[in-house]
Image: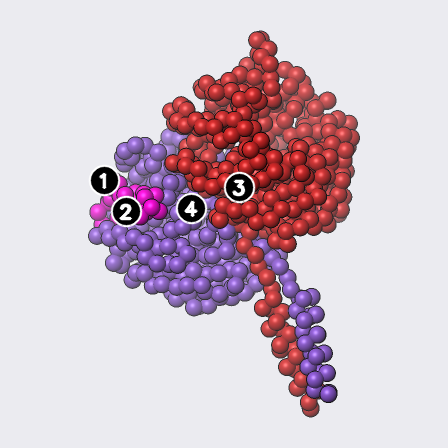
Chain colours: A purple, B red
Amino acid sequence: MKPFRTALALTLLMTTTALADTKTIATGDLGLVIERAKGSVILIDQSDRAALARIEGLGDLSHASIVYSPDERYAYVFGRDGGLTKVDIVERKIANRVVQGGNSIGGAISDDGKLVAVSNYEPGGVKIFDADTLELVADLPTGSKTIGLVDAPGRKFVFTMWDTGETWIADMSAVKSGGEAEITKIPDMGEYPYDALVTANGRTYITGLFGEDGLTALDLWADNPEPIRVLPNYGRGQEEMPVYKMPHLEGWAHTGAEFVLPAVGHHEVLWIDANSLEETARTKTYGQPVFAMARPDGRQVWVNFAHPLNDTIQVIDSVSKEIVHEFKPGPAVLHMEFTPRGNEIWVSVRDENKVKIYDTHTFELLREIEADSPSGIFFTARAHRTGL
Amino acid sequence: MKPFRTALALTLLMTTTALADTKTIATGDLGLVIERAKGSVILIDQSDRAALARIEGLGDLSHASIVYSPDERYAYVFGRDGGLTKVDIVERKIANRVVQGGNSIGGAISDDGKLVAVSNYEPGGVKIFDADTLELVADLPTGSKTIGLVDAPGRKFVFTMWDTGETWIADMSAVKSGGEAEITKIPDMGEYPYDALVTANGRTYITGLFGEDGLTALDLWADNPEPIRVLPNYGRGQEEMPVYKMPHLEGWAHTGAEFVLPAVGHHEVLWIDANSLEETARTKTYGQPVFAMARPDGRQVWVNFAHPLNDTIQVIDSVSKEIVHEFKPGPAVLHMEFTPRGNEIWVSVRDENKVKIYDTHTFELLREIEADSPSGIFFTARAHRTGL
């Protein structure tokens, strides 16, 4: 009888223990950190300032980004190797994975959460997948390296061709009922567009140019959007400064009435009137800015810098346009992500293998989390925003 | 040795079981609908366009609003009877409930999600509770009916006194470390402020006045905020039109460069420059507007109307400022809530006992959900926004 009694006791104990240890959490305050060297992601909890789990096997994440499903359950991770990995943050595992191209540069999710799009350097073009199954829904070859892919309201994707300087708007609304993607092509966006962004309301799409100075904007609300040249002096300029890293355009900060834009090759950020897209001011910075990110309320802009000055962050007040705080989180600050209401910021310090969390009002360091060569940090709250 | 081996096996097994039983529930696309007559709420799923459960026992919900915890798990429901009910949408039950005043008018949650504030008509004042336990953290008597309570960045709450025309800013950041609430009082906001709003970035607080025409704004970014009178002709005006319902100021729509404001007593909405707060245009409407709500991208403004014209919705294009769509969802359209990225809208039709879901691009009716006298609809995505 003894073995039986032991087994029974063991069962009872297990049940009790399991129940007592069962912890239920919701997904509104979760997120993922890219571990670029390991091909893994870490599941993080914003409220508890904690790492919950590591999920491995996502391929080459040396340049990776993430979008989320509307229920904040699934993350779509776009890897450098063309891998599109669907991570289930509830089950804490990979739900599905396809290698959809040879060299991918980013992706987007449609406003209804039903379609995931990926843009490719090799072989070029955009592929659009069913967000549920990752089955191919549309293949849009463009004959060019394709960059600057964003979503826009009305089940649209917008993207731009490096080689031909065209922007395409793909309206996928007819695809719901068995129709085709409807493509609008806009030529003459400029020479060698290398990145693009769309404003948070999905109205203004702006491409950065590698082949010439200036930027090109499109009003996506117009019946026939046409290229609008803005900031003609934006770029490397006559001095041909060495550019260590072209700034990320997705890092454009919107402070309300103005945008803040990292200069190319210069140690400064530019302030741009959000309506006229004309330059209003410049602020000198510590190094060549990579990301200039506005706290969600727009009162502060946090700036990190290109190698070799990438150990530092500066914080600019958006009213005085002056630097109000400067500190060194550590070697290789790669990315920053604000909590959705802006009270805290999470910072990746790659070469210290840490993510550091700061209070944005007191600048106090609140917590450090271990991570292997962390780069991008992405909170699930992104699920509810346009154009990421 | 046998007992030891058993103990080891048991430990391993327990560890595995405990981990496997950690439950995560995706809550990003959920929401609650107020059933005003029954004192209950319905849990809804935006992606499935479905009702999932009814939760009862919330008291008098004849005028109720909701805020959410940052993890999108808990809803704080503010009822007319002074009840503050914490609903666990994961467990689908009431987690806690206190009756904190005699006649409550609304509430807010701090940017870090740790404090919930409620403003009261009777006995007046604001009470602030621990969001976790609902224990009283601070009691702020104001000697007046208290209205227009909102949260602002930096663990602040802002609210206004009907009787004395003062606005108070309560900075709760010191309370974290055992300190007191720090109160800034701003007199001369105007005669009988009846409601207020804060802009989405938390910068501009605006009160509506019952006792005189015009509105009063405060720049919360200023070191010493002072009352700024705006729109001096806003109000009932000389004609003294009968006012069936004072418009909700929280319904102010921000379309990017402009706000849209329901007129008082007149059949029109006003367009206001977001920077100067000066009037730029008016659009004639079907009735006296109650809510004028911008689709999240700002391209459309949806307007509902006061009794007896409350069976109709008009949709205004924010570029042409013309009405582009008009329809009758049914008797007593009380509230509208957009999905966070604006592709759909949910509409409460009280006297038909239905919530109706529409595509905002095609205006197609997508689904109807049964609900008992539905009023407010609140999606969990509100957790990530300021000033609601």
Between residue B297 and residue A147, name the one nearer to us. Answer: B297
The kind of residue tagged 3 is Ile
Q: Which mark sits nearer the N-terminus, 1 or 4?
A: 4
Q: Quadrant of the C terminus of chain B?
A: top right
Q: Chain of mark 2?
A: A
Residue A342, quarter of the rendered image: top right
Q: In this picture, which residue range is highlighted in magenta? A: A159-188
Question: SS at mark 3?
Answer: strand
Q: Which mark is residue A180?
A: 2
Q: Which mark sits nearer the N-terminus, 2 or 4?
A: 4
Give the residue number, with chain letter if any, for mark 4: A112
Question: SS at mark 2?
Answer: loop
> Spatial distance from mark 1 to mark 4, Cα to Cα?
31 Å
Q: Is residue A126 above or below residue B23?
A: above
Q: Position of residue A313 (x, y in %)?
A: 50, 50
Tell me the mark number nearer the camera, choosing from 2 and 4. 2
10 Å neighbourhood of mark 1: few (<14), some, or many (≥20)? few
Tell me the mark number nearer the camera, choosing from 3 and 1. 3
Q: Would you say the residues marked 3 and 4 are in contact, meaning their CB atoms lie under 8 Å apart?
A: no
- Which residue is pictured at 58% across the width and 68% down the height? B20
